[in-house]
DNA sequence: GTCACGTCTGAAAGATATTTTCGGACCGGT
DNA sequence: ACCGGTCCGAAAATATCTTTCAGACGTGAC
């Protein structure tokens, strides 16, 4: 009786995860000719078969629906529907398996989809590197200094200038007095007015951007607490920094300037500083955040959504 | 009309592989109450839901079959059957290897090391979601428009304003005429001067920031090509956008405002635009990049390194 | 407060897909 | 060639998915 075979395998084989190809090989001898056709098709192209209905697969293999269902049963599934589900899972796994192939550089003729994948991958890598390389001791000290500071000034030019503004914006939102400067002259004149307990932060990837080092030096000499966010811990800027936060440096290429990954890295550091300060000053930070949110509500259409 | 929304999303969303959780978050605001129930169930337990029939899922969520199908459609699938297949794939992926989520929220008393880890993880997640959810067709079209544009204007306020500046800075470095505007009045007066073939880009997470929509509308009416970078594809800003680039929306908490992950997401999109344009205009972009690098060299100390 | 309007929702009808049934085709042994 | 058995596929039966439609609900206007 056919039933014997069915029952034996149904008992021995639960829904079956990914070992489908193996099972097909194992069971092939006990299959009839048409069933082998179906099993072969399924093992050969899981993704493609997952997209087919019973009828479709039957036609593809030149058999009938009944045979397809019988094959599914033999492979240990209650019916074709479940085989199909397993197939979809298998396909997804295979797909994600060959993801790490994106480590290559971005080329001039890469299709746009590759560009997206590579950029995303690189930035993820940068984040992981930065998090791993960040000195939590230095970070903690920096946060403590910020939380206690009456006033904070952030210096950065070009891409780092945007990061500086980002930090200042965030700190302002939790009621901290903070400003960003990208004009070197104004930055220096501003630094002169700093006093002990105030905090000055310099953001520079290379660590040797004179326009940013200069105001930090002035702040340092005025007795303010100074923090450097840089990718080169031993670079000139660190001379004048009480605390040094290191950002990571990713590979760069012609189409992917250094500014890109250093920015990602810097932003993570800046976010950590922000959250740290928000934690330490939670009682004032939380209401301030809520208030700033409220205040901006009317700037958006009454119904933010699209319904 | 409900149909409009449906069609927009159906067009913008291909079968979608693993970015389901992200898509649920992105589209949740545009969903009705019962649809949200379904979406939540699906995002919460892909494996479990994959095992259910339409009727089963309808009962589980206390809704009707019709609603389940509607939700599947909104998420970009032709029907429930396909959603179920995708769910099975997702479940398989989660199962194999990749740890699902350290998704714990950041708490007030988290030690600083945890803050770093959680922020880094969240931002990585945001990047992955954004990359998965980005419509390469729209992106390609946007790149083509940019590459051919005599002039590009970027509008964004607050955190998005920094992203706008980032994009403008980058484009300028490869010899593209681009400017960022965060002053709404100046932005509008600027938009008025745009002409066909010029490109205007609006960056707004909510998609309903009036100060950014207004200049885009003006640009749109002047015949310029308009691009919206937003987390809400169906929001008001998309009315005036020729191309819509969707950023992902991450969970947010009190200590982790939405601005943080939306910024990460927006920056990835902006980087993709930049690299895309650089590819298309390689002959002029490459020398321009090299030249800008040269020009800045003297601004750094003679020996940039750290020894 | 009441009414009109548009949206959301689920029940049931309608369409597809899957499973089962059943009779014929094929194969090897006698 | 005949017989017993297995294998196979067409079509019926069932389950599942999709669409339609009318009532329920909330919202804004008067």
Image: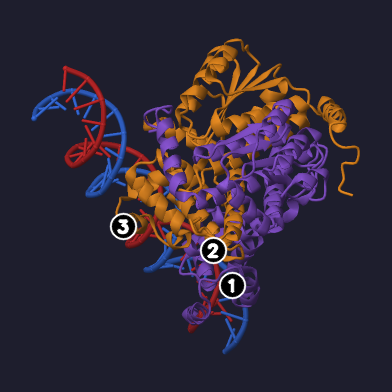
Chain colours: A purple, B orange, C blue, D red
Label 1 SS: loop
Q: Is residue A234 left or right of residue A286?
A: right
Rate crowding at label 1 as few (under 14), some (14 to 19) or many (20 or more) other CA atoms within 10 Å. Answer: few
Q: Are marks 2 and 1 in contact (CB under 8 Å)?
A: no
How far apart in space, not on screen, are marks 2 and 1 (Cα)? 22 Å
Numbered-mark total: 3
Mark 2 = which residue? A86
The structure residue drawn at horizontal position 64% and vertical position 77%, both measured from the top left corner, is A26
Label 3 SS: helix
Of the two numbered discs 2 and 3 in the rendering, the one whose residue sits closer to the viewer: 3
Say which chain tag 2 marks.
A
Q: Is residue D12 above or below residue B173?
A: below
Q: Position of residue B131 (x, y in %)?
A: 62, 44
The structure residue drawn at horizontal position 37% and vertical position 31%, both measured from the top left corner, is A303
How far apart in space, not on screen, are marks 2 and 3 (Cα)? 24 Å
Q: Tell me where residue A34 sits by quadrant.
A: bottom right
Q: Position of residue A127 (x, y in %)?
A: 67, 51
Q: Tell me where residue A182 sits by quadrant.
A: top right
Q: Is residue A158 left or right of residue A51?
A: right
Name the N-terminal-most of marks 2 and 1: 1
Mark 3 = which residue? B59
Q: Position of residue B173 (x, y in %)?
A: 77, 27
Q: Are dots 2 and 3 on a single chain? A: no
Say which chain tag 3 marks.
B
Q: Nearer the viewer, residue B145 or A226?
A: A226
Mark 1 = which residue? A32
């Amino acid at each position: 009786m056919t039933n014997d075979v069915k029952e034996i395998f149904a008992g021995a084989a639960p829904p079956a995860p990914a070992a489908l190809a193996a099972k097909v090989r194992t069971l092939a001898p006990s299959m009839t000719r048409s069933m082998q056709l179906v099993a072969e098709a399924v093992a050969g192209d899981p993704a493609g078969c997952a997209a087919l209905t019973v009828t479709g697969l039957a036609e593809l293999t030149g058999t009938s629906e009944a045979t397809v269902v019988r094959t599914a049963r033999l492979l240990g599934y209650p019916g074709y529907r479940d085989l199909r589900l397993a197939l979809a899972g298998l396909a997804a796994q295979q797909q994600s398996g060959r993801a790490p192939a994106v480590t290559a550089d971005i080329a001039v003729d890469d299709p746009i989809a590759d560009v997206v994948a590579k950029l995303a991958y690189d930035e993820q890598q940068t984040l992981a590197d930065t998090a791993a390389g960040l000195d939590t001791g230095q970070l903690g000290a920096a946060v403590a200094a910020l939380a206690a500071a009456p006033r904070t000034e952030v210096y950065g030019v070009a891409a780092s200038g945007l990061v500086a503004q980002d930090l200042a914006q965030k700190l302002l939102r939790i009621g901290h007095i903070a400003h960003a400067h990208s004009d070197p002259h104004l930055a220096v004149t501003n630094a002169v007015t700093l006093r002990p307990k105030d905090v000055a932060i310099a953001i520079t990837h290379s660590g040797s951007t004179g326009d940013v080092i200069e105001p930090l030096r002035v702040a340092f000499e005025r007795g303010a607490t100074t923090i450097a966010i840089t990718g080169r811990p031993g670079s000139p800027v660190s001379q004048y920094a009480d605390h040094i936060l290191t950002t990571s440096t990713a590979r760069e290429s012609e189409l992917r300037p250094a500014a890109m990954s250093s920015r990602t890295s810097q932003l993570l550091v800046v976010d950590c500083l922000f959250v740290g300060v928000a934690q330490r000053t939670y009682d004032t930070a939380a209401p301030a955040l809520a208030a700033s949110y409220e205040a901006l509500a009317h700037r958006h259409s009454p119904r933010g959504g699209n319904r």
